[in-house]
Image (cartoon, rainbow, N blue to C red):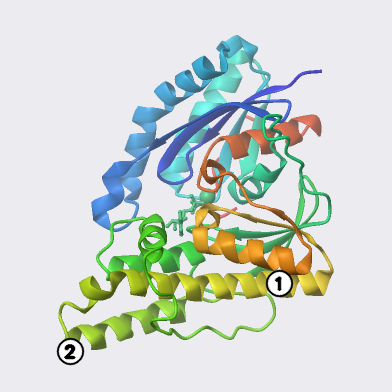
Amino acid sequence: MSVTVLAIESSCDDTSASIVRDGYVLSNLIASQEIHRSYGGVVPELASRAHQANIVPVTDQALKKAGLRVSDIDAVAFTRGPGLLGSLLVGTSFAKGLALSLGIPLIEVNHLEAHILVHFIRNDKVNNTVPGFPFLCLLVSGGHTRIIQMEDYLEMRVLGNTIDDAAGEAFDKCGKLMGLDYPAGPAIDRLAAAGNRKAFRFAKPSIKGLDFSFSGLKTSFLYFLRDRVKEDPGFIEKNKADLCASLQDTIVSVLTSKLVKASNETGIKEIGIAGGVSANSGLRAAVMSEAEKRKWNLFIPEPGYSTDNAAMIGIAGYYKYLRGEFTDQDVAPLARF
Ligand code: KG4
Ligand code: ZN
């Protein structure tokens, strides 16, 4: 039996629609909202309005790209949360309306679970294999930093979590202090390539177990810049590449060392990274080097599947469809899921 899922993602500032058939992605369209760049963060009201404007054309394009009509869909999957309530409401209402009008099942998806499930997308072109279970995944996004142990497609256990800021937030907030636009992660990654990662040292948090903390790093970065700029107002501009490289190196080394600890403690060597920050070239290089040393079977998402996208909602929806996990029409979005 073939299963075709139309998936909708609208948890933050990207409106995305995707068609996933039997674990293969037929299309994955993303409309990014440039409007937030100059505000230094996502403005919730503007995000909701942009989702409203984008959701129909993006869905239409996803169907066209897949060469399908709306009547070819077997189910509609959507992000129920976590995310911005107003943004989630647009995707949830649209998905509910579509499923109701077509008389097909509605499937709610947890955005965080979906980030991890990108590793189970099939792709004949690159002859990809998928992780075996148990699978250990470092999930690093703008809102979350977690180490998750997966026992099955939909069975996940959180082994470690951030006690304050997420890794993506650390990139974005420190970037803002350097005058970079939101989201600063990609720009820091680019600038870091030309910098010396040992130029400056920033304090690394010493948090017990597998938990993380990034708020101290942000504060120490703030005080460091404040003191240096007092001595030389041009300090940031003159040292931007080195600042980015050193900051990135600090964040990457905290993330990587916890992932190594988790693997050592659980004995699991099926390892992956996921979420927006998993696009970071420093993090990718660091986990690849650990994988080689430690004989991990490592999974790194294609760049387009690191940051928010609907294909990940589609693959999660596909596995839920196979298990008959459907959602009632009275479902409401959850900002905290
Ligand atoms: O997963 P995601 O797209 O959205 C959330 O669910 O939060 O993650 C967005 C985060 C932002 O903080 C952004 O700065 C960060 O991912 N990010 C990066 C890179 N690309 C995106 N951080 C560092 N390096 C990158 N290349
Ligand atoms: Zn995300």
Residue at figure coordinates x 42%, y 65% from the top left: 171
Decide if residue 288 is on the left or right side of residue 227. right
Question: For residue 292, what is the image quadrant?
Answer: bottom right
Other-residue count near label 1 (Cα within 10 Å), few / some / many at <14 / 14–19 / ≥20: some
Where does residue 135 sit, x and y in percent of width and height?
78, 56
Residue at figure coordinates x 57%, y 42% from the top left: 80
Decide if residue 124 is on the left or right side of residue 195. right
Position above or below: 336 against 239 = above
Which quarter of the rendering shows the N terminus?
top right
Position above or below: 337 against 109 = below
Residue 104 seen by the camera: yes
Position above or below: 84 against 62 = below
Residue 162 seen by the camera: no
Gap in angstroms between the C-alphas marked 1 and 2:
40 Å
Residue that numbered label 2 is attached to: 231
- Residue in front for this viewpoint, 317 or 177: 177
Question: For residue 18, what is the image quadrant?
Answer: top right
Residue at figure coordinates x 41%, y 71% from the top left: 245
Residue that numbered label 1 is attached to: 260
Other-residue count near label 2 (Cα within 10 Å), few / some / many at <14 / 14–19 / ≥20: few
Where does residue 122 sit, x and y in percent of width and height?
71, 34
Q: Which amino acid type is marked by label 1?
A: Val
Where does residue 95 sit, x and y in percent of width and height?
54, 28
Q: At numbered mark 1, what does the secondary structure look like: helix, strand or loop?
A: helix
Q: Which mark is residue 152?
A: none
Specify whether tag 1 is near ligand 1 (CB below 8 Å). Answer: no
Q: At numbered mark 2, what does the secondary structure look like: helix, strand or loop?
A: helix
